Each structure stands twice: as C-alpha cells, then as structure tokens.
Image (cartoon, rainbow, N blue to C red):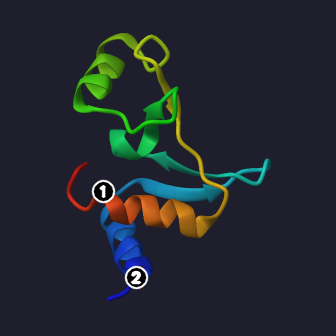
Amino acid sequence: MTEMQQALTMLAGLKGCHLIDTPNGRWHFVGRVPARLAYERKDGAEATDEDVEKGRRFGPALAGLKTRSWASREEALTALASLDGQG
C-alpha cells in the first residue's frame, strides 16, 4: 500500500474528520481532527503533548499554537499518514 493509499484509509477511519480545499487555496482538516493534525506551534515546530494539553486547558492561542494548513491535498494526506497512531 502506498503512503497516499494509507493516508486515505486513515482518513476514512477518522469519523467526522474531513479534508477541505478552502477559498484561499489552502487545505485544512475540519470536524473531529486529532490535535496533532489540527495544530502546530507558532514557530512552525510540531506540537508536543504538553503543548496540546495546554491548548485544551487554556485555548490554542495562549498555548502558542496555530491551526495547520497545507498548500496541496497531497501534503495534507502525507501529514495524516505521518501520524500513524500518534493521534
């Protein structure tokens, strides 16, 4: 199974999580999105478990998180495939 097929299979298994193309041309996951897929740190680094917990308690902005987006559908699906159980 290719990485793209794996990502599509994972997306199908995430009930309520959808990948959309927004009017500004960026791709976003919406709905019930795993936190590691929804947010990244404002400096662009991957959010840690501690960052995600702070985001849940105090809100993403106060935790130093921003919403993730991708330039292409393929980039978004690659990010999803890279989670592989990290949630």
x and y, in percent, of residue 13 in the image: 30, 66
User: How crowded is the residue under tag 2: few (<14 C-alpha within 10 Å), some, or many (20+)?
Assistant: few
Residue located at (65% from left, 63% from top): 72
x and y, in percent, of residue 85 in the image: 20, 57
Q: Secondary structure at mark 2?
A: helix
Of the numbered discs in the image, which one, if any, rests on residue 45?
none
> In terms of image quadrants, where is residue 4?
bottom left
x and y, in percent, of residue 24 in the image: 79, 47
Residue located at (71% from left, 51% from top): 22
N-term mark: 2 or 1: 2
> In terms of image quadrants, where is residue 15?
bottom left
Q: Is residue 79 above or below residue 66?
A: below
> In terms of image quadrants, where is residue 38?
top left
Tag 2: residue type? Answer: Gln
Of the numbered discs in the image, which one, if any, rests on residue 5?
2
Q: Is residue 24 left or right of residue 36?
A: right
Residue located at (45% from left, 18% from top): 64
Q: Secondary structure at mark 1?
A: helix
Tag 1: residue type? Answer: Leu
Distance, label 2 to label 1, CA atoms, is: 14 Å
In front here: 33 or 61?
61
User: How crowded is the residue under tag 1: few (<14 C-alpha within 10 Å), some, or many (20+)?
Assistant: some
Of all residues, the one furthest to the bottom in this rendering is: 1
In front here: 29 or 42?
42
Q: Is residue 87 left or right of residue 46?
A: left
The mark total stands at 2
Q: Is residue 84 left or right of residue 76?
A: left
Of the numbered discs in the image, which one, if any, rests on residue 83?
1
